[in-house]
């Protein structure tokens, strides 16, 4: 195992400016990741709401005759 380190690389990594720059980039990426996670959670919630709404009208009632192209929303309770 070779543990030798290039002096130029070592000086760049230990340079305070380099370390500060890396910290700024990490902070920026962390903020973007958190924003992306928040957006993803919002989209998942919205998708679940839309799926729930679409399933609301996907019911079959036994004993109730169906007609072709019947619009059940119009036949249901007027406040639905």
Image: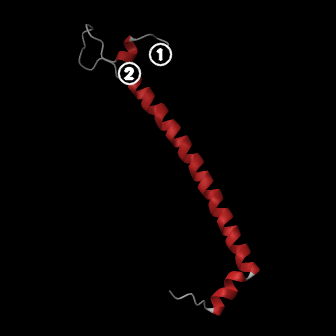
Question: Which residue sits at x=65%, y=92%?
Answer: 7
- Residue at the extreme top of the image, as rendered: 63
Q: Residue 9 or 73: which is nearer the viewer?
A: 9
* Mark 1 / mark 2, whichever is N-terminal: 2
Residue 11 at x, y = what percent?
69, 87
The relative height of residue 55 versus residue 47 in the rendered view (above or below) is above
Q: Residue 6 or 63: which is nearer the viewer?
A: 6
Rate crowding at label 2 as few (under 14), some (14 to 19) or many (20 or more) other CA atoms within 10 Å. Answer: few
45 on left or right of 12: left
Secondary structure of the residue carrying numbered label 1 = loop
The relative height of residue 46 versus residue 19 in the rendered view (above or below) is above
In the picture of the structure, the residue carrying the numbered disc 1 is 80
60 on left or right of 26: left
Residue 75 at x, y = what percent?
37, 11
Residue 77 occupies quadrant: top left
In the picture of the structure, the residue carrying the numbered disc 2 is 57
Q: How is the image coloured?
A: secondary structure
Residue 60 at x, y = what percent?
30, 17
Rate crowding at label 1 as few (under 14), some (14 to 19) or many (20 or more) other CA atoms within 10 Å. Answer: few
The relative height of residue 67 versus residue 24 in the rendered view (above or below) is above
Q: Residue 69 or 64: which is nearer the viewer?
A: 64
The Cα atoms of the two marked residues, 1 and 2, are separated by 10 Å
The answer to whether the residue labelled 1 contacts the one labelled 2, judged by CB atoms less than 8 Å apart, is no
Secondary structure of the residue carrying numbered label 2 = loop
Question: Which residue sits at x=23%, y=18%?
Answer: 68
- Residue at the extreme front of the image, as rendered: 1
Residue 3 at x, y = what percent?
56, 87
Tag of residue 52: none
Question: For the image shown, how many numbered marks are present on the structure?
Answer: 2
Question: Which residue sits at x=39%, y=17%?
Answer: 73
- Residue at the extreme bottom of the image, as rendered: 7
């Amino acid at each position: 195992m070779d543990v030798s380190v290039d002096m130029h690389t070592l000086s760049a990594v230990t340079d305070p400016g380099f370390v500060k720059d890396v910290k700024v980039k990490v902070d920026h990426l962390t903020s973007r990741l958190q924003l992306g996670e928040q957006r993803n959670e919002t989209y998942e919630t919205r998708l679940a709401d839309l799926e729930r709404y679409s399933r609301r009208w996907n019911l079959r009632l036994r004993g109730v005759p169906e007609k072709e192209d019947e619009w059940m929303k119009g036949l249901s309770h007027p406040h639905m």
